[in-house]
């Protein structure tokens, strides 16, 4: 004679499988996002405006097409390199500000920064636009 229910000696693994599948799906979605870049617009910041120092910094402009301009004249990367070495030797300025369009190729900005660093400039700045404007 049996009294009450028979006890089952099995473990119910269905909730465990559900949780594992949900975690697997989360990892499958987030893993590609960690390795690929996300499009962002870097030029807009909430920083305060750059304060003026005793000497005016030199401003280098990089256009949307990737053209480098110094004092309003278009120059090549090689000319910029030679100019930067000469400017550093003559101590024309301590600081150089780079004004790059947000849609310009990042490789051009990196090359300009590299050439200026190679010439010996240590105070380099990237100009941005305030979000409130």
Image (spheres, helix red, strand yellow):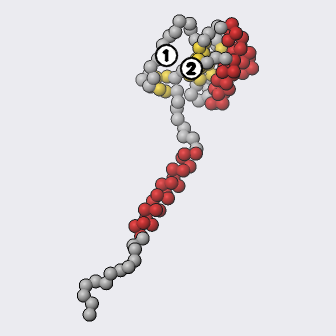
Disc marking residue 50: 1
Image x and y of residue 82, in percent: 74, 15
Image x and y of residue 5, in percent: 28, 83
Q: Residue at x 40, y 77 (%)?
A: 10
Q: Are marks 2 and 1 in contact (CB under 8 Å)?
A: yes
Name the residue nearer the viewer: 4 or 111: 4
Q: Residue at x 66, y 30 (%)?
A: 107
Going by the image, does 31 lie left or right of 14? right
Q: Residue at x 56, y 49 (%)?
A: 32
Residue closest to the far left = 3
For mark 1, does the 10 Å Cα neighbourhood hold few (<14), some (14 to 19), or many (20 or more) residues? few
For mark 2, does the 10 Å Cα neighbourhood hold few (<14), some (14 to 19), or many (20 or more) residues? some
Q: How many marks?
A: 2
> For the residue labelled by badge 2, is the local secondary structure a helix, a strand or a loop?
strand
Please tell me in which quadrant of the rendered image residue 93 appears: top right
Disc marking residue 105: none
Q: Residue at x 26, y 93 (%)?
A: 1
Going from the N terminus, do you reach mark 2 or mark 1 first?
Answer: 1
**3D distance between C-alphas at marks 2 and 1:** 9 Å
Image x and y of residue 52, in percent: 50, 10
> For the residue labelled by badge 1, is the local secondary structure a helix, a strand or a loop?
loop
Q: Is residue 75 visible?
A: no
Please tell me in which quadrant of the rendered image residue 94 appears: top right
Name the residue nearer the viewer: 124 or 72: 124
Going by the image, does 14 lie left or right of 56? left
Going by the image, does 49 lie left or right of 36? left
Answer above or below: position of 130 versus 85.
below
**Viewport quadrant of the C terminus:** top left
Disc marking residue 125: 2
């Amino acid at each position: 004679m049996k009294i009450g229910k028979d006890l089952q000696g099995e473990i119910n693994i269905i909730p465990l499988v559900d949780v594992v599948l949900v975690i697997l799906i989360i990892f499958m979605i987030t893993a590609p996002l960690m390795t690929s870049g996300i499009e962002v617009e870097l030029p807009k910041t909430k920083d305060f405006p750059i304060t003026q120092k005793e000497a005016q910094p030199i401003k280098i402009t990089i256009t949307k097409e990737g053209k480098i301009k110094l004092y309003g004249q278009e120059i090549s990367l090689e000319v910029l390199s030679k100019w930067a070495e000469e400017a550093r030797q003559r101590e024309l300025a301590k600081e150089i500000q780079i004004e790059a369009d947000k849609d310009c190729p990042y490789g051009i900005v990196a090359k300009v920064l590299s050439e200026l660093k190679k010439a010996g400039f240590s105070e380099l700045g990237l100009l941005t636009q305030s979000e409130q404007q």
